[in-house]
Amino acid sequence: MRQSVDVNRVLEQNRRYHDEVEADVYDTRMGVIHDSFTVRQMIAELERVLGRPLPTGCTVVDVGAGTGNVAVKLAMSGRFDRIIAADISEGMLARARASAEAAGCSIETVQTDMVRLPFEDETIDLVVGCAVLHHLPDPLAFMAEVRRVLKPGGSCIFIGEPSKWGKRIIETLKLPLIGVNRVYKLVSGRPGISWEHDNIDVHTFSIRDLRRVTAGYENVRLVPEGFLETVLDQSFFTAIRYMQGTLPGVIPVVTAIRRTCRALDQSLLNRIVPRDLRTDMKFSAVKPARTDTASVT
Ligand SMILES: C[S@@+](CC[C@H](N)C(=O)[O-])C[C@H]1O[C@@H](n2cnc3c(N)ncnc32)[C@H](O)[C@@H]1O
């Protein structure tokens, strides 16, 4: 986790990048789909990280909800009273609303930079977040803000955060693709916008970092998972998914390979790959009824 960042730059680059680039391509790039299989899969993943069934009939906030990957699936499950999708990018939230409408369910959306969450103290039952902490200027301050809005005994669950070592492996494997992309840009003369990626993907997390971000919570569960699926997906499949329009049949093949890799991760690699090398950092934590107790398992 980086120690010092330019807060305004990180917020502004994230807002613009997600509005101007990601909103149009994110679901395709990341293979986000909403159907009964992916809804069950999402609920199962959140419950595995929480270590017990999700609460029902309550208010849930999806922080950094983006195009609604988590929020729409939670709404489709029909288990909750209120789902609020919070994000800095209005473009991403517009996609989330469209996906919810297409799925026949409803979510509320709120645009916020989350430096301060726009909710009263102790009003939220469950906070979920997928692939968001690494974009924030100050994950430690943000987790204090999550604690402020959670009801005592309320939980937060975070998934999909890049691990420090997993990211290094992926970056190394991506080098040839980055080279090809540079040559392509040079040859085609395609004008490139130079995004400050260091100010967009700001942090990676080690197990030690996760212990720091969950300080002040209790029943902390650190669940680093995944290796092969994420490594292959982020190194190669992302590029392949862009070609789906021109090469029919690509997506089913990539999806089948991803599911096979995930099965291998779940059946074997999650047990033998060292925790810090696993690629997806996931954790859950509970706001204590009394704020002076904290325990880590
Ligand atoms: C990688 S996307 C993840 C989206 C979604 N959670 C998912 O699972 O697909 C990260 C999201 O975080 C949002 N984000 C980044 N910085 C933010 C901030 N400071 N406040 C609120 N949202 C932010 C981005 O706009 C983007 O939608």
Image: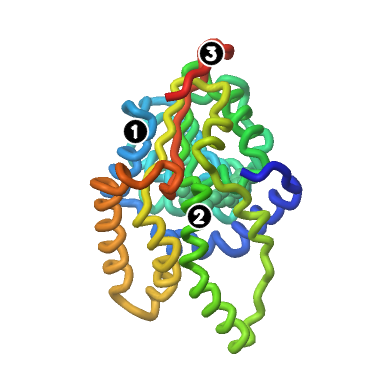
Nearer to us in this view, 57 or 39: 39
Residue at far bottom of view: 187
Q: Residue at x 69, y 49 (%)?
A: 11
Q: Which quadrant is the N terminus positioned in?
A: top right
Q: Rate crowding at label 1 as few (under 14), some (14 to 19) or many (20 or more) other CA atoms within 10 Å.
A: some
Q: Name the secondary structure under disc 1.
A: helix
In x, y percent, where is residue 289?
51, 12
Q: Name the secondary structure under disc 3.
A: loop
Q: Residue 167 has which mark?
A: 2
Q: Earlier in the sequence, mark 3 or mark 1?
A: 1
Amino acid type of the residue that numbered disc 1 sits on in the rendered structure: Glu
Amino acid type of the residue that numbered disc 3 sits on in the rendered structure: Thr
> What residue is pinned by disc 3?
293
> What residue is pinned by disc 1?
47
Q: Are the two marked residues, 2 and 3, in contact with CB atoms closer than 8 angstroms?
A: no
Whether ligand 1 has any atom under 8 Å from the Cβ at mark 2 is answered as: no
Q: Earlier in the sequence, mark 2 or mark 3?
A: 2
In x, y percent, where is residue 84?
51, 37
Spatial separation of the CA atoms under disc 2 and disc 1: 25 Å
Q: Name the secondary structure under disc 2.
A: helix
- Using residue 243 as the reference point, say whether residue 133 is left or right of it: right
Query: Is residue 173 at all visible to an observer of this figure?
Result: yes
Q: Residue 76 has which mark?
A: none
Whether ligand 1 has any atom under 8 Å from the Cβ at mark 1 is answered as: no
- Using residue 93 as the reference point, say whether residue 51 is left or right of it: left
Q: Are the two marked residues, 3 and 1, in contact with CB atoms closer than 8 angstroms?
A: no
Q: Nearer the viewer, mark 3 or mark 1?
A: 3
Q: Nearer the viewer, mark 2 or mark 1?
A: 2
Q: Earlier in the sequence, mark 2 or mark 1?
A: 1
- The image quarter containing residue 80 is top left
